[in-house]
Image: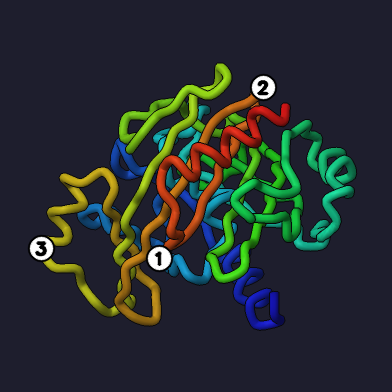
Amino acid sequence: MGNERIEIYKESMESIKFSDYEKEHMVHQILNGGAKDGGRMKGKLDIKKLGITIAACLTLFSVTALAAGEAAGIVSWNRIDTRTRNFEDLPKIEEKAGMDITAVEAFSNGYTFEYMEVSEAKTQDADGNDLRNFKGIDLTYTKEGCPDIYIGMDQADMYGDPHDRDTAVREIDGITVHYNYDEYLNLPGDERPTEEELQRTETDNHFFISDGSDERYTSYVSGIDFEIDGIAYIMIGFDIDMSAEDLFGMAEEIITAR
């Protein structure tokens, strides 16, 4: 990761705030002083620049509500000072996060461990008052010529439980695994979506509009989530050339490594 990417990463971590889950199938809305706007997410959300932020915090897939009824949103950041590229440091990272997770160093499809770090999050009420604090663990996997894949592990009770918009579901060794494939239309801050695009946000559970990008572009987000022993595992890739079966296979390798 170059210096420029690191700075973008840090800036993303510091500036993102999550709140007001505006539709029953949406799990996030980026706060930047905005009210609801036809399903459009207010504030700066450029998929290309956020990387693991999405995996760790937005939980784009099947989670639809915060677990604590009084909580209105999540603020989250990553502890880059804890980052390590040595997979053997996993016990140290687990100790810092206060978690016991299952992770693999390499997947059979060629994706291999790149680095891991501790994440932190806190839930807030509608007035921005802190409610609960959480820690998690984020891992990044790479494969030559392919986009990175991110896996975030967080306390499952950070989130609500409904999975009413899954693209596909699979039972693997007693664990229910949820898959979603979402389309994101990214717009510059000064560009309005068309009426047709706004209407689609109301009828398509897998189409979202966000603003704050440098140009108009579309990204496709593939993800898997499941729970093991009270830990939520969220695996995500941006514009990856992988099917649901491919991601289910990766999930199975984690699950069977328990």
Q: Which residue is mark 1?
A: 43
State the separation of the CA atoms marked 3 and 1: 20 Å
Q: Position of residue 182 (x, y in %)?
A: 34, 51
107 or 64: which is nearer to us?
107
**Disc 1 and disc 2 in contact, CB within 8 angstroms:** no
Q: Position of residue 113 (x, y in %)?
A: 72, 55
Q: Which residue is mark 2?
A: 229
Q: Within the image, what quadrant is residue 91 found in?
A: top right
Label 2 residue SS? loop
Q: Nearer the viewer, mark 1 or mark 2?
A: 2
Q: Is residue 18 visible?
A: yes
Q: Residue at x 63, y 36 (%)?
A: 253
Q: Position of residue 19 (x, y in %)?
A: 45, 48
Circle 1 Cα neighbour tier, 10 Å, few/some/many (<14 / 14–19 / ≥20):
many
Relative horizontal placement of residue 23, taking residue 222 as reference (left or right): left
Q: Residue at x 44, y 53 (%)?
A: 242
Circle 3 Cα neighbour tier, 10 Å, few/some/many (<14 / 14–19 / ≥20):
few
22 or 80: which is nearer to us?
80
Along the polypeptide, which appears first: circle 3 or circle 2?
3
Along the polypeptide, which appears first: circle 3 or circle 1?
1
Q: Within the image, what quadrant is residue 7 found in?
A: bottom right
Q: Residue at x 49, y 30 (%)?
A: 177
Q: Label 3 sits on what residue type? A: Glu
Label 3 residue SS? helix
State the separation of the CA atoms marked 1 and 2: 35 Å
State the separation of the CA atoms marked 3 and 2: 44 Å
Q: Describe the colour scheme in one phrase.
A: rainbow
Q: Which residue is mark 3?
A: 195
Question: Which residue in the rendered view is the most extreme toward the left?
Answer: 195
Compared with residue 138, is residue 158 higher up or lower down, i.e. above or below? above
